[in-house]
Amino acid sequence: MRKMGITLLVITTIIIGIFLGFPELEARCMAWLDRYRAQPEGFVLVSFCLLSVDVYLPVPSSIVMFANGAVLGIAGGTLLSLAAALTGSMAGFYTGRLSRRLAQRFVPANRQREADELFERYGPISIIITRGIPVLSEAMAILGGTRQMTALRFLQLNLLGYLPVCLLYSLFGHYAHSSAAFLWAFASSIVIAFLYWVGGRVFVKKSVPRKT
């Protein structure tokens, strides 16, 4: 838990530092995205590919999801982000299902331990409560395939976990011309991740009987 908190703190600090240190960056980014609103086909393809490989490569998925909302609107951005995120998660799932040794090539040893501890402690709901947590989310996707879980069940859990995050980024991306919109979107995604985490722990405590 402490390691995840440190990870979120570092990422948040970097994002805020970038946008505070370069106040014109957000305006330039939005001007660049405006070009694709008239002809978004190429943007859709690039965005889908980036989010789909996020489980294997360090793609800034939050920025891509935000851009989806800016270019395609709330509904279109949400659907694109969700479809790509689910595709990436399922690719990770089948990577883990194919071979745990293969899964270990993509997941560092420390992340494997964290993911294994979460699976053991919270069960399948750990998939939901980690969808908004950077790095760990990808590790859980790959290692999920090594667990006794059907692909359909894994897909359902990812859908529940990813939908609010994708919707949030698309919502703020759509209204991104307001001041500091990206920072608000990023902050809100952290809040949602925290709520999922706390809510999941409460659910588990109430659902699993205590040992006597």
Image (cartoon, rainbow, N blue to C red):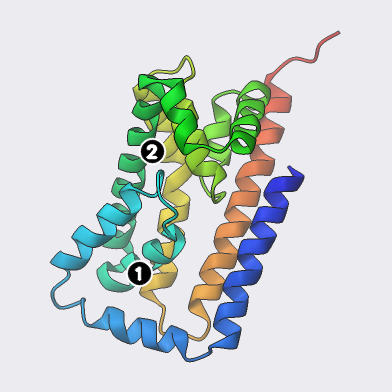
Residue, disc 1:
67
- Quadrant of the rendered image containing residue 30: bottom left
Q: Which residue is painted at 73% across and 42% down in the image?
A: 1
- Quadrant of the rendered image containing residue 199: top right
Q: Is residue 191 above or below residue 147?
A: below
| Quadrant for the C terminus in the image | top right
Q: Amino acid at mark 1?
A: Ala
Q: Position of residue 183 (x, y in %)?
A: 55, 74
Q: Position of residue 113 (x, y in %)?
A: 64, 30
Q: Amino acid at mark 2?
A: Ser
Contact (CB < 8 A) between labels 1 and 2? no
- Quadrant of the rendered image containing residue 211: top right
Looking at marks 1 and 2 on the same chain, the residue that comes earlier in the sequence is marked by 1
Q: Is residue 193 above or below residue 64?
A: above
Q: Position of residue 2 (x, y in %)?
A: 76, 46
Cα gap from disc 1 to disc 2, whole angstroms: 20 Å
Q: Residue furthest right?
A: 212
Q: Which residue is painted at 41% across and 27% down in the image?
A: 102
Residue, disc 2:
89
Q: Residue 73 vs residue 198: left or right?
A: left
Dot 1: element? helix
User: Crowding at label 2, few (<14), some or many (≥20) Cα neighbours within 10 Å?
Assistant: many
